[in-house]
Image (cartoon, helix red, strand yellow):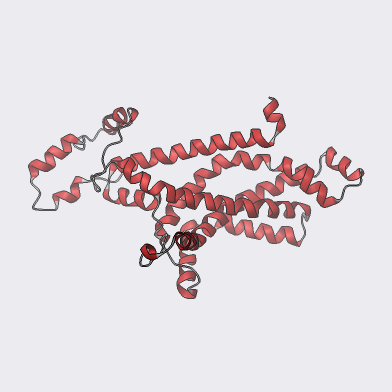
């Protein structure tokens, strides 16, 4: 929405002729101030699979996105696994010990995750890495030693660089899951079939793990597709702070340079990933809940 376009920076270069700039304006339809007209000129080729070339990189935008999207998926997938692994047992524990000190401690942790901005949390983690030296403060691997590493060393190095950004994103996602799991478990534990299972002599933790948890987890799976939107938007900022070479850095650079084809294609990719996330959530629900398969 800010004024100007990519060619404004080129106009500051005296070696670039005005005729060349005028031809570029006509070629990319940057001479029009009508946003609907410019959108149509982008949409019609995009429907045929042609998303154009990046202004700044002079490469097809899908080539640039293809180089980065796997890095973003690695980060968001790891963060989601981290948040689910912690949120399900913590939410269950909070429900079982409702209104007691474990519940209050877990509630404090979830409040922290919901409240802290991802950018600030990322900066704190970068400071922690710089002060302690326990983790690398940024990047995806050791640039100096990468070419001399074996395959196993490259894997370990990448995972080591992944830890801090994964914790940032995973903690923020975990907070939402913990609250949802707690409320669902509290409701599930009050159902008649739970009391029946207890009356049959089953131990409390067996009832919780075998009967209650499987039913309480369904709403969390439904949240999968929706929470992926929050996770991806947080990943863009986290990638920027940590220097993670994913879509986040690519989109920020494209926005700064007003590289419209690259920005538009990146947004399309993010929306596509959200659709896939929602589809996976629906398939998982059908896999874990027999009632949905019957219907």
Q: Position of residue 19 (x, y in %)?
A: 8, 41
Residue occupying image coordinates x 52% and y 57%:
166
Q: Tell me: 268 left or right of 221.
A: left
Q: Tell me: 142 left or right of 171.
A: left
Residue occupying image coordinates x 43% and y 54%:
237
Q: Quadrant of the C terminus?
A: top right
Q: Position of residue 118 (x, y in %)?
A: 49, 57
Q: Position of residue 293 (x, y in %)?
A: 68, 28
Relative to 292, say whether 271 is above or below.
below
To which quarter of the image does residue 261 belong?
Answer: top left
Residue located farthest toward the front when viewing the structure as drawn: 150
Residue occupying image coordinates x 35% and y 50%:
250
Q: Position of residue 162 (x, y in %)?
A: 49, 59
Number of disc labels: 0
Relative to 220, say whether 283 is above or below.
above
To which quarter of the image does residue 268 belong?
Answer: top left
To which quarter of the image does residue 170 belong?
Answer: bottom right
Relative to 109, say whether 69 is above or below.
above
Q: Quadrant of the N terminus?
A: top left
Residue occupying image coordinates x 59% and y 53%:
83
């Amino acid at each position: 929405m800010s004024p100007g376009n990519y060619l404004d920076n080129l106009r500051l270069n005296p070696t670039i002729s005005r005729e060349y700039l005028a031809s570029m304006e006509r070629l990319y339809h940057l001479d029009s101030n009508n946003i609907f007209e410019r959108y149509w000129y982008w949409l019609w080729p995009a429907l045929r699979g042609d998303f154009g070339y990046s202004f700044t990189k002079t490469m097809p935008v899908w080539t640039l996105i293809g180089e980065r999207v796997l890095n973003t998926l690695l980060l968001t997938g790891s963060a989601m696994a981290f948040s689910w692994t912690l949120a399900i047992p913590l939410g269950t524990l909070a429900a079982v010990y409702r209104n007691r000190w474990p519940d209050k401690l877990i509630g404090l942790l979830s409040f922290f995750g919901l409240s802290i901005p991802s950018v600030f949390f990322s900066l704190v983690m970068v400071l922690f890495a710089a002060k302690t030296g326990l983790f690398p403060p940024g990047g995806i691997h050791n640039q100096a030693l990468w070419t001399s590493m074996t395959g196993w060393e490259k894997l370990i190095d990448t995972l080591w660089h992944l830890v801090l950004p994964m914790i940032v994103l995973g903690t923020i996602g975990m907070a939402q899951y913990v609250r949802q799991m707690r409320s669902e478990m509290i409701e599930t534990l009050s159902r008649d079939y739970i009391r029946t299972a207890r009356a049959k002599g089953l131990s409390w933790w067996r009832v919780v793990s075998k009967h209650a948890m499987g039913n309480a987890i369904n709403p969390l799976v439904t949240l999968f597709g929706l929470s992926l939107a929050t996770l991806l938007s947080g990943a863009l900022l986290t990638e920027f702070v940590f220097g993670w070479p994913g879509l986040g850095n690519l989109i920020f650079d494209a926005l700064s340079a007003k590289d419209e084809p690259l920005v538009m294609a990146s947004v399309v990719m993010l929306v596509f990933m959200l659709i896939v996330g929602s589809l996976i959530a629906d398939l998982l629900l059908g896999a874990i809940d027999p009632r949905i398969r019957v219907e």
